Structures are given as structure tokens and as C-alpha cells.
Image (spheres, rainbow, N blue to C red):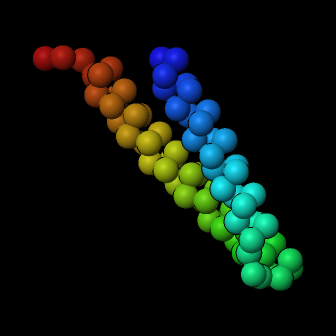
Amino acid sequence: MRRVFSFFIGTLIGGIIGAATALLLTPAAGKDLRIQIGSRAKGLVDDIRQAASSKRIELKERLDTLRAPRA
């Protein structure tokens, strides 16, 4: 469990460093960059919500199957 936690922490730190590097080295203007980041963040949030919704439906169906009386 500790190795998995360490992996996720390392991935998070690497992502933050990568994002900071990309922001510092980008050739786009500040306003354009903010618009791009905003639209990508919105898309990411939408993707996460959609994935959570589909997983919730899947888990509900599984729970209903498990709760159903057995013949």
C-alpha cells in the first residue's frame, strides 16, 4: 500500500512540475493561454463527471443484482 501511495504522490508532483514547465516555456500570449487552460480544465471536469456518473450507474446495477433474491 505504501508503494502505491508513493507512486501517486510522485505522479502528482511530476504532473505539477510538468505543468509549471509548460506554462513557463509556452509561446502563447497570456490571455490566449488562460483561455486554453480554462477550456481544457472544463473539458477535464466534464470527462471526470461523465466517468463518475457511468461508474455510479454500473455500481448501482451491480448492487441491485447482489440484493436480488436468489431462486
Q: Nearer the viewer, residue 8 or 36?
A: 8
Nearer to us in this view, 37 or 23: 23
Q: Is residue 30 left or right of 4 when viewed as pictured?
A: right
Q: Position of residue 67 (x, y in %)?
A: 32, 20
- Find residue 33 and report its image quarter: bottom right
Left or right of 66, for residue 38: right
Up/down of 39 relative to 17, above or below = below
Residue 70, placed above or below residue 17: above
Q: Nearer the viewer, residue 63 or 52?
A: 52
Figure quadrant of residue 28? bottom right
Q: Nearer the viewer, residue 40 or 8?
A: 8
Residue 57 coordinates in the image, percent (x, y): 43, 42
Point out residue 32 in the picture as x, y percentages from the top left corner.
80, 81
Count all numbered tags in the image, as a single digit. 0
- Residue 59 shows up from this direction: yes
Instruction: Residue 17 in the image: state x and y as whole percent.
Output: 70, 51
Residue found at x 61% / y 59% = 44
Q: Which residue is at 28% across, 28% downward?
A: 65
- Give the residue drawn at x 74%, y 75%: 26
Q: Say which residue appears at 70% left-offset and 65% top-offset.
A: 22
Does residue 58 lie above or below 16 as drawn?
Answer: above
Mark yes or no: residue 38 visible: no
